[in-house]
Amino acid sequence: AVAAAAVAGHWQVSPAQPPVTPKGKEMIWDCHCHLSGVGGATAEERTSELLRYADRVGIERLVVSMGVNWSHDPSPDHVRRQNDDVLRAVEAGKGRVLGFVLLNPKYAQESLAELDRCVHDGPMVGVKLWVAMKCNDPRIDPIVRRSVELKAPILQHTYFRLGGNLAGESSPDDLAALAARHPDAIFISAHTGNDWERGTRAVRAVKNVSTDICGCDPTSYMVDMAVRELGAERVLYGSDAGGRSYASQLGKVYGADITDEEKRLILGLNLRRLLEPILKSKGMQL
């Protein structure tokens, strides 16, 4: 029923619940969460778990992408099932969960149709690209152009993997090449490439790319360097929950030698700004 509502274009967005962030505390929006790695048999149960732990550390909103069961190179049917899981998570989150649609660019027409189903006709507010195809491939360009039309940011998995990346896995260098071709698009370099020193420098010159700090160990100086090289406005808090804990990734921000205002930007204000155009276009509460 959830997916059918999106297809029919009759999606009703649930009103956001009152923020869980205590008055006077930072607004925290997590730009990178998944339904894996947490307890629960269904997407709804896993969403409840994600929010239960988010409440402990004052996280107001979560961006969720990818379903309960993953695949490196999913078929169009598998992509659709994963996105149906995220649609159910968005509904269960009652305004606190924001969905990004997973796409496999190897299937061009199916990807564009799924983008319209979940974003244009549904409640999702961004795009997630994973490891099926390197993102500097020109076949991704139609997806980027449609995302721009919909005001949807693109969260691209990026990695510098010790021993070499997976087949189809993008590096921050690949994302920098894609972003240079599409200066009007909004990109987020997930994990800052894991090797965060290289990953930060790789996207430094491409102003329409922000980095998220999620996934790797809570290493000192990661956030400090990103702020120095990119500016605080291009750095986003993300956790990679349930693969990582919220708190370990928050520690990267709270422990950084940066100003309180820079921390507020990273923890939530930057993501809110990137999502504001599409949230407003959907009549969703900021």
Image: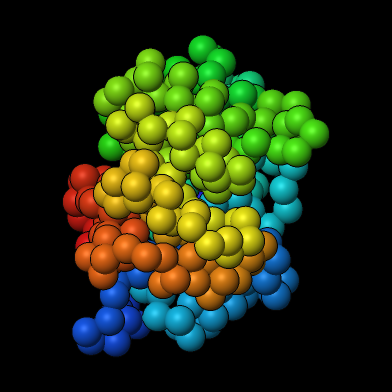
Residue placed most toward the observer, 209 or 9: 209
Residue placed most toward the observer, 37 or 240: 240
Quadrant in which residue 283 is drawn = bottom left
- As displayed, is residue 71 above or below residue 75? below
Quadrant in which residue 151 is drawn = top left
**One can see residue 246 in this view:** no
Q: Horizontal and vertical percent for residue 255? A: 44, 71
Q: Residue sitting at 72 percent across and 71 percent down?
A: 41
Q: Residue sitting at 70 percent across and 75 percent down?
A: 39
Question: Residue extending furthest top?
Answer: 138
Q: Horizontal and vertical percent for residue 71? A: 74, 42
Q: Residue sitting at 43 percent across and 49 percent down?
A: 225
Q: Horizontal and vertical percent for residue 91? A: 45, 65
Q: Residue sitting at 53 percent across and 66 percent down?
A: 249
Residue placed most toward the observer, 191 or 83: 191
Q: Horizontal and vertical percent for residue 252? A: 48, 65
